[in-house]
Image: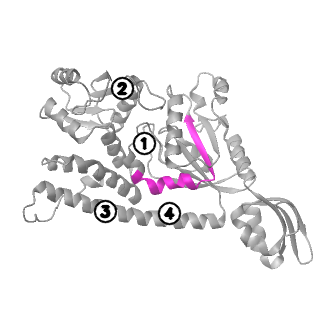
Amino acid sequence: MLVGAQLKRPQDGRLAWKLEDSLDELAQLAWTAGVEVVGRTTQQLERIHPATFIGKGKVEELQELRDDLGFNVVIFDDELSPRQQRELEKALGDGVKVLDRTALILDIFARHAHTREGALQVELAQYEYRLPRLTRAWTHLARQAGGAAGRGGIGGVGLRGPGETQLEVDQREIRRRIAHLRRELEEVRTHRRQYRQRRQREAIPVVALVGYTNAGKSTLLNALAGSDVWVEDKLFATLDPTTRRVTLPGGRVVLFTDTVGFIQKLPTMLVAAFRATLEEINEADVLLHVVDITHPNVRQQSHTVGEVLNDLGATSAPIIVALNKIDRLPDPDAVAPLLSEFPNSLAISALKGWGLTELLARVEELLETALVPLTVHIPYREAGLLALFHQRGTVEREEHGPEGTLVQGRLPAALLGRFRPFLLHHGTGKDA
């Protein structure tokens, strides 16, 4: 049973979703998690009720619907406090489990995290979510855990100390496990940072694919790189980040990185747990925002992505908007008026390969603006530097002399130090 509630007067300036549209998405999340939805109910609220989130009358309605429909799970579209979850389960009686959107997303993430890093991130988020909700009925939580937390992570708790209750032992063990996971993830973060530094020294540009979940990012990465990233028409079908090399029309090699999809009401603990992964977005040279132009809530989805990027502090890199899935439109030309709504956008079909040449040209154009003009004389003994200039920069003029090669062109700023000994002109054209 799905439950959606909304304040009559929203307290933030966010672009509000209609209740039914948000519940449609919740139903899709439930389906992805293997849950059968038998009904839904909504309520407009003057205020959130501290004990049960929804009003007393709505709780009584759920009790009646339970008898009629026989559901054994109630999923709320918003995050519930531990108290609200307990009070609702008490009111609905034995055999009915109350979950919220956060718990549902955590379960889906646990199913789709296949790498060690992904599993660590999900397990940390699961424990941080469950710790304040821990009660004496701990065993049912251990059984229902969806990821590593349900695979023996805290099944064998230690001996009880003097005067300790089992609840206190369980809480202590979970805190110990959370601390351990954070240390492991810090090692992952350090490894990622070293990898990024090496990548920066090589001056390989990075394009980060961002977008709402199921917008088609993985399909686009496959189409651009000729790769085989798993693709499925489900929310959060791919979770672990994937990076592929792509050659731009001018011959320059760039890295395209596919990141976890965003969603409205994305749990803050997930953002925190996936910090190491999401840092890839902050370090990118270009953000490629993939939008499902066929979705009825396309504007709300796009707005949500913008909010998450802002929360992550990813506001400095230029953004290209790819209006995807135009092959699903009755008339693909109907997308033309929408291009003006999305700055620096173009229409594509990742599935059909439409518009991808133009997309790569747009990426190349943006990267070109970040290159620094210079003229260098490279001795023949430094043939590797000449090859590097061709690989990472743009050559506008090249002349071979008796002692070396004169090259005029543009290079990433990160590479200037390696060419400084052979620099003739830089930036303004004045002698260096």
Disc marking residue 7: 2
Residue in the picture at 43% in, 48% down: 239
**Image quadrant where residue 319 sits:** top right
Which residue type does callout 1 highlight?
A: Phe
Figure quadrant of residue 233: top left
Residue topped by disc 4:
192
Left or right position of 233 against 51: right
- Residue in front for this viewpoint, 425 or 327: 425
Q: Earlier in the sequence, mark 1 or mark 3?
A: 3
- Which percent across, then down, holds residue 58? 23, 22
Task: Kindly identify which residue carries mark 3.
Answer: 179
Question: Which stretch is magenta?
Answer: 272-291
**What is the CA distance from the residue labelled 3 to the residue labelled 4?**
20 Å
Vertical side of 209 occupied by 347: above or below: above
For marks 1 and 2, give the CA distance: 28 Å
Q: Nearer the viewer, mark 1 or mark 2?
A: 2
